[in-house]
Structure formats: C-alpha cells, structure tokens
Amino acid sequence: MNDYSQLQKKIGIKLKNQKLLENAFVHRSYLNEHRKEGLQNNERIEFLGDAVLELASTRHLFDKCPDESEGAMTSFRSALVKGKHLAEIARELDLGKYLFLSHGEEQSGGREKNYILANTVEALIGAIYLDRGYKVAEKFINKFITTKLDEIIEKGLHVDAKSRFQEMCQEIEDKTPYYKVLKEEGPDHEKTFIMGAYIEEELIGKGKGTSKQNAEDQAAKSALKAKEWE
C-alpha cells in the first residue's frame, strides 16, 4: 500500500479505512496485470463520488447564487464538474503519483491524462464520503472545487462552446451547425473520437476526445477560432 499521509495532510482529511483510499487510485488497467486479492478498480467508487460532487456543487450554487437562473446555475455546475477542471484539481493535489496503472498505461502517460485524473478526483470524493460521511466530503468539494467558481465566471469558462457556436451560426449565417464522426481510434473500452463541426457541407473545425460529446466540444472551440467568433 502507498503512503497517503502527505496527501491526507494536504487535504486535511484522514480516512479511517486506508483500503478505501487505496481503492480510489486503482485504474482498471492495473487489474489486468495484477490479481491482488481484495483489490477493485475505482469505477464503482468513482460513480458514487460523481453523485456526491453533483449534489454538493448544486447546493453550493443554490446558496451562493440566489439571483441566478436555473440555466445559469446549470452552466456553472457543468464547468465545475467537467473533466478538465477536475484534472486541474488532481494536479494541484498531485494525485497522479498515487495511481495504480498497467505498464502500458504508464508508458502512454496515464498519470497525466485528463480523464484518468478527473475520474480519480471523483473516486477520492467517493472514498471520503464512504469513510467520513457527506459533510466531510462536501467540505473537501467546497475547499478544492467550488472555490474556483469566481475564476470560472470571470474567465467565461462556464460558456458552452457548442451553444456559443450554434448561437453565432444562427445569428450571423442563419444556419444551424451539426457534427459528424470523422474517425474512431483505440479499443472499445478506451475509444477516442474525432468529430467535425459543419455549417451546411463545410467542415469548419475538428475536435478529439474520449467521448463524442467531448470531441464535439473541442470541434466547436476549433470552429469558433476558425471563424474568429471567440
């Protein structure tokens, strides 16, 4: 087992069950090479952490943004819990160094991949919730995640690129954009998508991501830049 004392000091939370903490860092690829008794990948605990994160961030926005509409708060929440933001939190906490990865995932730079780091943050939240309860998990979320809300609003990071691209297309060109899969790469469990953003038959921008939604978002950002609509 890794020594998690430095991490627990950094987050100000000590877990009673260190096995739960260890579980939060076990990527599924690791178990393909290591059949360690009692060890599970972090996907189930990540699923739980995702739900806790959504509830805590929703409550934070409800309390802190009394004058905002439901739509605005939904945009803020999406920005708070999106993978790129969570990956930045993971880097601040240096979570990558604690990961259990397969040799292949290690060689491909798994400790720096946004989606793995983001999933690890959610798994860590799940572990805190199971071990210390909702209030302590909420405290962690408000200390490291929702505290970035002002910066997100100031930098406009809550603005959805796809919505912005559609709005500009309809306003300037009186057209509705659409997206197509240009290419799929990798095995089924780790597929990467390349999507194209189109206006009529013209390809305006391309984007790559670990889901079609992420790739479409990147394509929209590329298209906004290409059209100088940023």
Image: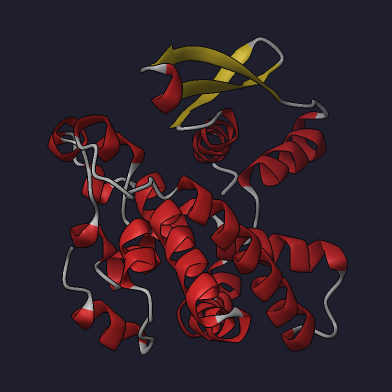
- Nearest the viewer among 120 and 82 is 120
Percent of width and height locating residue 141: 53, 77
Q: Is residue 42 above or below residue 178?
A: below
Q: Is residue 133 visible?
A: yes
In this view of the protein, which residue sits in the foreground, 21 or 91?
21
- Residue 129 against residue 173 in the figure, above or below: below
Residue 196 image point, x, y percent: 55, 21
Q: Is residue 192 visible?
A: no
Q: Is residue 33 left or right of residue 129?
A: left
At x 66% / y 9%, what residue is drawn? 201
Coordinates of residue 66 in the picture (x, y in percent): 83, 85
Please give the count of numbered marks on the rendered protein: 0
Give the residue drawn at x 53%, y 41%: 221
Q: Is residue 124 left or right of residue 80?
A: left
Rendering coords of residue 199 (x, y %): 68, 20
Find the residue positioned furthest to the front: 37
Q: Quadrant of the N terminus?
A: bottom left
